[in-house]
Amino acid sequence: MTPPHQKPPLPRRTPRAGHPAAAKIQEAVAARDDLAAALSGAGIQLPVMDVRTPWPDTDGDDTARPDRYALVHLGVCSAPVAHALAAVIRKGAAR
């Protein structure tokens, strides 16, 4: 357990070469880039899009763990951007 005066370490966003999570990170980066391109094509830009891992970085043998996905973090956006995103989703869903 982390002492109360010390923050827990942040997850590693770029796993070491050969790390079992490397493929999941690359998959999430590709998904983030695809989503950013689609949003850009619709005239929408989110201020921050990031890839994060929900698991701690360990130096031990974690090959026995089940596959986990890296997460595409969409960050925050202003109310007008949220409305624009909702409108694009509604328009696409109506097709």
Image (spheres, rainbow, N blue to C red):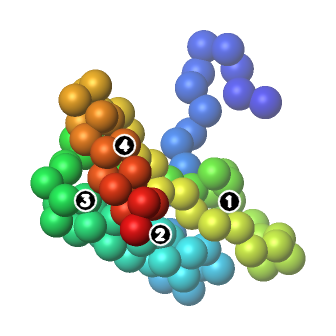
Disc 1 to disc 3, how far (Cα)?
A: 35 Å
Q: Secondary structure at mark 2?
A: helix
Q: Which residue is mark 1?
A: 58
Figure quadrant of residue 57: bottom right
Q: Secondary structure at mark 4?
A: helix
Nearer the N terminus, badge 3 or badge 2?
Answer: 2
Q: Which residue is mark 2?
A: 28
Please state the horizontal and vertical placement of residue 69, each as a whole percent of the image.
Answer: 63, 66
In this rendering, position of residue 73 left or right of residue 83: right
Disc 4 to disc 3, how far (Cα)?
A: 11 Å
Q: Secondary structure at mark 1?
A: loop
Q: Nearer the viewer, mark 4 or mark 3?
A: 4
The residue sitting at the top extreme is 5
- Badge number at residue 39: 3
At label 3, which amino acid type do we have?
A: Leu
Please state the horizontal and vertical placement of residue 45, each as a whole percent of the image.
Answer: 19, 49
Nearer the N terminus, badge 2 or badge 1?
Answer: 2
Which quarter of the image is occupied by the N terminus? top right
